[in-house]
Image (tube, grey):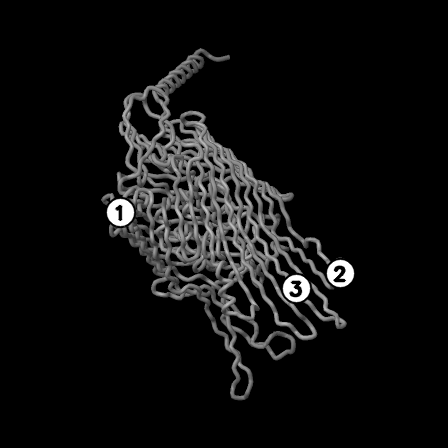
Amino acid sequence: MLYPKANRTMSKALLSTGIGLLTFFASEAQNHTISGYVSDLSSKEILIGATIIDDVSGKGASTNSYGFYSLTLPAGNIRIRCQSVGYLTYEKDFNLISDTVLNIPLSQSASELEEIVVIARRHSVNAKHGATDVPIEKIRNTPALFGESDLMKSLQYVPGVQHATEGKSDLTVRGGSPDQNLVLLDGNALYNINHLFGFLSVFNTDALKNVTLYKSAFPARFGGRLSSVIDVNTKDGNKEKIAGSATVGLLAAKFNLEGPVIKDKTSFTLSARRSYADLFMGKIQEWTDEDGNSRDNFYFYDLNAKLHHKFNDKTSFHVMAYKGVDSYKNRMREKDIPGERTHSSTHQDWSWGNTIVAARFNRSLAGNLFMNANLSYNRYAYRTSIEEKFNFIESEKEKSAHNRLRYDSGIRDYTGSLEWEYIPSTRHYVRAGAHFVFHHFRPEVFRLSENVGNAINADYQSPALPSARTHAKETAVYVEDEWTAARPFILNGGVRLSTFHVREKMYAALDPRFSARCLLDGSTSVKAGYSRMRQYIHLLSNNSLLFQTDLWVPVTDKVKPMNSNQYSVGVYKTFNRLFDFSIETYYKTMDNVIEYKDGASFSGSSASWEDKVEAGKGRSYGMELSVEKPSGKLTGSAAYAWAKTERRFERINDGEWFPARFDRRHTANLYLSYRLNRKMDLTIQWTYASGDRMTIPLMVVEAADIPDAWKPGEGLTQFDHRNNYRLPAYHRLDIGMNYTPKKEGARYGVWNFSIYNLYNRMNTFKLYVQTDVEKDAGGKNTYTRRLRKITLFPVLPSLSYTYNF
């Protein structure tokens, strides 16, 4: 029973609540939502990251990965202004009286139409913390190895990002290893990003539309890796007319073709690239080796294709496919041995690559609700085979024999996801989603077959030797909200719940994410972020110079998932609307990272791999400075990073902290592009990095002369700690030039000339210990050990020609 006083108190509370709700709904009823897509006027290609602002209220929004935006505004007169880099500003005044669909076409600026212009996206004080948009034009115009523009090498000029090895595409980001980077192609994970043994990445720049790198403050929608996310989106295709380009360079040829299937409704894009060294390598080897004892050949290709159909202004359907392959072949023939062996030959074949097929359906369910569904198949495969054939003499009769060893490995993923974006007001941008991945790990399968004699029944084929084929189920659900709080604060908070079920073991994690921005004035902001990440798969790699058999394996009951916690804070400022300056610091801890035990290594088999590694801790911290000039005839950037990364394992290095392999204390990058006139622009880039770490012995104790104990010159080695030696510093200068003789509308040719490693710096690719043997005065052998280095690339000029139509 309620007392009269309590009853009156509750009545007042209910009345106040009711009045508050009525006031809220009344105010909401006076708001209406404008939504739609932003696209290129001439091609109808959707634009990612375009900004839409109402000049009356000052409220704004930006387009998502599918070109969709939603902006809720008070009813009444508004002035919409839409902007995107390289496009003229769109403006529209009207009276907002109801929810409105407004699709915005943007036309390219006059300068873009008349000449080649390298325009970088401004970092701006409003840019997201930890995220960097990489302009496609900058990637295309960056001087590159063999004249091939390369996405991954362009990312190496972002502060906090470093190359893993000389000339290669693998990246290390803020103290992480290359396998800790999540690389997404239209939302699908790539397990191998390398062509040409790692010296070129799998991305054909002609197919790219947008690239965003996240190195901290990760949104909750990303997960599965510890150190970075590289989100790559490809073109949807021109819906108005046929357009494209073709390029011929020293290493490869490529083309891109796009156009309408049904005008303004359905478009396609097709990009292909292939190397052609194999077309003349055979002839060269015939000239240089008349005996024909050895023949080598290599090629790679990649193919991107996409079909985009727009059912109406709210609904779209995409189908994409990617196929990339590398193939290396070696043929050797040994000389005949009279009376013993004839016609002896060995064939060795290597091939590896990715295959992705994905379908995506997205729809605007309401003016402020957007849905995206995705199904995909993803496969990475590696295969090598060695076959030996020979004829031999037995009992004065000639017989034949062959032996064949085949090795297969890879991983297959079947993925389904459903994502929503909800914008209830200009203060909130809510994202939520669910992902499911069925992993099929195939670490390796060995098959051995042999034939001795001439009879068919003499064939023998072994069953597949032990293979740790494993299935795993990975799920994730997430929710995040970007909340514009009381000015000048913008907060982004989210959480990601993930599970991983492998064999009889289930792992689960709840990872929070948080970032905040405080706008101090119109040109200065302070940003901070925290991210917790989890990784359920590991990459096992050998130390081969070229032929790497990299195997992806899941966590087990012995080896737990890796975790990281990263804290970051940065200050961003724009000076006179000409220069963007930023300084960021970070601190990252890692748990359950793995390292090979002393004396252990990976040799191509994952058998008992858990017993060869040790799980431990890692930490990295550093500071990054960047200055960028994004517009004008002279554009460019300068960056410097100081960093330190360490590891600690209970049974390695006596349990003490030691420098990680990729612990580089200093890195510096300079990029400059100057437009001389409408026909010519020049690019200069310079990079510097402290050397990698490796372990070398401090002392070798020679052993007694005991027969069959060990080889001469070997002994017992003593080390003070792991990775105790730093390689020489790495630095290189590249230059490039684009020349456009004549431009007639959309049809024009561009000559590109570049020089890689202009001052011929012989950077260390790998060090090894060489033992020299000399005789002393008494005729006794003496052994001297020296460090020798392998270098790869001297000064390399390149030339290519691109025709656009």
Number of the front mark, 1 or 3: 3
Cβ–Cβ under 8 Å for marks 1 and 3: no
- Above or below — where is 538 with respect to 109? below
* 639 vs 427, nearest the viewer: 639
Q: Position of residue 265 (x, y in %)?
A: 43, 31
Q: Secondary structure at mark 1?
A: strand
The outermost residue toward the bottom is 778
Number of the front mark, 1 or 2: 2
Q: Which residue is mark 3?
A: 389
Lower sequence index among marks 1 and 2: 2
Q: Position of residue 444 (x, y in %)?
A: 62, 53
Query: Gap between marks 1 and 3, in whole Å?
Result: 66 Å
Q: Position of residue 371 (x, y in %)?
A: 47, 30
Q: Secondary structure at mark 3?
A: strand
Q: Is residue 115 visible?
A: yes
Q: Which residue is mark 2?
A: 455
Q: Which residue is mark 1?
A: 579
Amino acid at pointer 1: Phe
Q: Residues within 10 Å of mark 2 (few under 14, many from 20)?
A: few
296 sits to left or right of 801: right
423 sits to left or right of 783: left
Q: Position of residue 270 (x, y in %)?
A: 45, 43
For residue 11, the mark is none
193 sits to left or right of 455: left
